[in-house]
Every structure is written in C-alpha cells, then in structure tokens.
Amino acid sequence: EADIYQTPRYLVIGTGKKITLECSQTMGHDKMYWYQQDPGMELHLIHYSYGVNSTEKGDLSSESTVSRIRTEHFPLTLESARPSHTSQYLCASSSDPGQGSYGYTFGSGTRLTVV
Amino acid sequence: EDQVTQSPEALRLQEGESSSLNCSYTVSGLRGLFWYRQDPGKGPEFLFTLYSAGEEKEKERLKATLTKKESFLHITAPKPEDSATYLCAVQARTGGFKTIFGAGTRLFVKA
C-alpha cells in the first residue's frame, strides 16, 4: 500500500493558471522531495525539505515554490503555468540513515499538461 | 560532479534468459547506492540499498552487487512481470540527502 499520496493524478490546465500539486505522507518522515521526470529521462530534483519550515531548491531550475508547514504535507505550487512545465511530478519521502534502508518512498506522481 | 550512467538503455529478454544491468557512478564519497523499479505511469518502487564495495543484496529473482565504480543488477530466469524500467541512484556523503538518478534501463521480458 502506498504511504505517500499525490493529487491530482492527471491535470490539464491553461497557460497562466496557478496550480498546486498536493503531496502527503503518513510515515512521519522528516525528509521530503519533489522530482520532475520527462518520459525516458532521469528524475531531476526540484525541491527538498528536511523538516518543518525547512525548504531548499534542488539542482534543476524551477519556477515552482514549496512549503512545509506540517511534517506530513509538502505541496508544490506553480504561480503561472506554462507549456514548458508539462511533465510528470513525483513526490518522495525518506527516513534517516540508520533507520532501515532509507530508500525513497515515491507517490504515484502527477502528470501535468499545460496547454 | 556526481553522476550515474546506466546501460543498456533497453534490454529485451526471453522468459528464463538471465542477464545483468549495469550502473556506473562517480560520487564524492558514497553514502549509498539504490536500485528502484518503475512501472509505466507510476512512481519508482524501492528495491535495494548498497553501502560499500563487495556488498550484495537479493530479492526474489534480483541480485544487486556493488564495486567502487559500478553496480550490477542481475536478473535470474526473468518472467514477463519483471518487465519495467530499473533505476540506479546514488547519494553522496557530502550532498545532504539528495539522490542523483540515472536514466534507467527499460527491461522487456517476452513469454
């Protein structure tokens, strides 16, 4: 069973609209991440958080923003969607090293299309 | 710069035909190397973590091994349900907990 939930699964939206992609996890993980993945390509880190009120930009330049007000919730917002934002967005969380394998648990993703 | 390269890009096998996937990496101090499985339209599913050269992990028909420069994912007697994209990823000790992913190997197993 997935312990990390992303909504919506699919979204088609017009250029210039503001959108928020939701991500929630029930595992109590401090560390959460947003990755962007185009078909057949690597996952690229766009934002991460190591705890409440802690957020950082990743390696891939992004026009999105994130917030971490609660441990379980890590939403991603695009203020003004553009066709170049069309992609799959994956949310993940992880435990600390020493707490098991600390591999990432991923959500099912949000496939965003901006027209 | 930390980097992960996977080969081949795609691999087609007959059911029962064993093979290996390769992951070459460069990282400034390895904290962990990870293997994931990704099915179409889904998020990656965690398979293994390897920490140091010489380590091996097994799960059903899959076995992951690690050297100082590369990792292999061996698939023994694959079945059609093993068809998926297999992703390799690394974390550096100095990179916080950020993970760098390879582009993956798409595995097709025909019955």
Image (cartoon, rainbow, N blue to C red):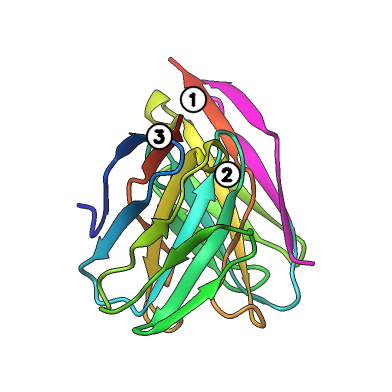
Q: Secondary structure at mark 3?
A: loop
Q: Which residue is mark 3?
A: A14
Indicate the position of residue B108 as horizontal and vertical percent values. 52, 24
- Inspect the magenta stretch and tell me whether residue B6 lies in it: yes
Q: Position of residue A85 (x, y in %)?
A: 52, 43
In the rendered image, which residue does mark 2 sit on?
Answer: B74
Q: Is label 2 in contact with label 1 (beta carbons under 8 Å)?
A: no
Camera-nearest residue between B3 and A39: A39
Q: CA distance from mark 1 to mark 3?
A: 48 Å
Quarter of the image where one finds residue A79 = bottom left
Question: What is the residue that sits farthest to the front in this orientation?
Answer: A16
x then y, percent, for residue A101: 42, 71
Say which residue appears at 45% left-offset and 43% top-offset.
A16
Q: Secondary structure at mark 2?
A: strand
**Badge nearest the viewer, 1 or 3:** 3
Q: Amino acid at mark 3?
A: Gly
Residue that carries the numbered disc 1 in the rendered image = B16
Q: Quadrant of residue A69?
A: bottom left
Q: Residue drawn at (46%, 45%), measured in percent from left and top?
A: A81
Asked if the stretch drawn in magenta spans residue B93, the answer is no
- Mark 3 crowdedness (10 Å alpha carbons): few <14, some 14-19, many ≥20: few
Rendering coords of residue A32 (x, y %): 40, 70
Which chain does tag 1 point to?
A: B
